[in-house]
Image (cartoon, rainbow, N blue to C red):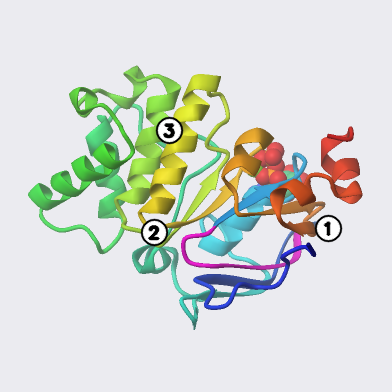
């Protein structure tokens, strides 16, 4: 079977020619891909290959791209402010933890809701936050615990709940499995599949390859800011260029 590198018809998200430089370093170099609604597109690549920078450039958090087009549901959105992108249905989590340690789990999610126009009265925001925490499987008994007192897995769930609370159509997850135990990775895998069942398309950056290849419909590999492979996961991880750039040894 040839690699599935062409954009799926009726893409929910299509990016074209995304480029971002830091001085002389071209961190993301002319990256293009498209996602079908409900698709999980995995992103792998060595440290520093531009994966997080790609998310940052697409979501405009915390910086803009130098060049490129982002089409969301058929409409160019690369010039919309970050909060508008989130309100349209493009939500993300961060590689570095972004929960507020002194706030409770539920207050952390409320803060995320208040940053977009989805927010309403406090009562409504509390309800939306509690629903989001329930969806990700965060224990109801811990809603009012300070984030600082929670184990890393639950803090990650709070961060994912903050994105889910925005009712996204596309969710961008940046290394959600880092620092997790094998059992927690199993729970994360189940959550990712559950979110897809709910209709979300998911763009998933991950170094835990077994998780990435297990849940992704297609896999994209970046190296030095460029897409070096895009296609069916089992095939992509066998691609000699991918093996050389990333895996180091033949799988
Ligand atoms: N704000 C910034 N200022 C300057 N250079 C940056 C900035 N953000 C990223 N870079 C550089 O851009 C390159 C790509 O970084 P990026 O964080 O996107 O890699 P990554 O693929 O996410 O890596 P990792 O797997 O380690 O998370 C790296 O060389 C990095 O040092
Ligand atoms: Mg990164």
Tell me if residue 181 comes above or below residue 198 in the rendering. above
Distance between mark 3 and mark 2 Cα atoms: 21 Å
- Would residue 188 be seen by someone viewing this image from the given angle? yes
- Would residue 60 be seen by someone viewing this image from the given angle? no
Q: How many residues crowd mark 3 within 10 Å: few (<14), some (14–19), many (20+)?
A: many
Residue at which label 1 appears:
24
The picture places residue 94, in percent across and down from the top left corner, at: 51, 43
Question: Which is in the foreground here, disc 1 or disc 3?
Answer: 3
Residue at which label 2 appears:
199
Residue 30 sits inside the magenta stretch: yes
Tell me if residue 71 comes above or below residue 207 in the rendering. below
Q: Is residue 211 left or right of residue 187?
A: right
Q: Are marks 1 and 3 in contact (CB under 8 Å)?
A: no
Residue located at (23% from left, 36% from top): 106
Magenta residues, as a range? 28-39
Residue located at (47% from left, 24% from top): 184
Residue at which label 3 appears:
156
């Amino acid at each position: 079977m040839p690699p599935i590198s062409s954009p799926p018809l009726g893409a929910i998200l299509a990016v074209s020619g995304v480029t971002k430089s830091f001085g002389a370093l071209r961190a993301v170099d002319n990256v293009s891909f498209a996602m079908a609604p409900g698709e999980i597109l995995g992103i792998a690549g060595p440290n520093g290959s531009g994966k997080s920078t790609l998310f940052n450039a697409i979501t405009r958090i915390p910086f803009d791209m130098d060049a490129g087009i982002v089409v969301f549901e058929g409409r160019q959105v690369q010039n919309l402010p970050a909060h508008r992108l989130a309100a349209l249905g493009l939500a993300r989590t961060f590689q570095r933890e972004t929960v507020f340690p002194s706030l409770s789990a539920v207050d952390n999610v409320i803060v995320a809701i208040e940053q977009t126009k989805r927010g309403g009265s406090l009562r409504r925001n509390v309800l939306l936050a509690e629903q989001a925490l329930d969806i990700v499987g965060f224990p109801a008994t811990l809603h009012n615990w300070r984030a600082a007192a929670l184990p890393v897995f639950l803090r990650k769930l709070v961060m994912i709940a903050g994105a889910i609370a925005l009712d996204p159509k596309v969710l961008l997850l940046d290394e959600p499995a880092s620092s997790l135990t094998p059992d927690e990775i199993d729970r994360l895998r189940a959550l990712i599949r559950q979110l897809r069942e709910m209709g979300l398309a998911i763009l998933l950056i991950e170094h835990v390859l077994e998780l990435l290849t297990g849940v992704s419909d297609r896999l994209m590999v970046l190296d030095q800011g460029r897409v070096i492979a895009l296609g069916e996961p089992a095939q992509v991880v066998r691609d000699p260029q991918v093996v050389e750039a990333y895996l180091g040894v033949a799988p």
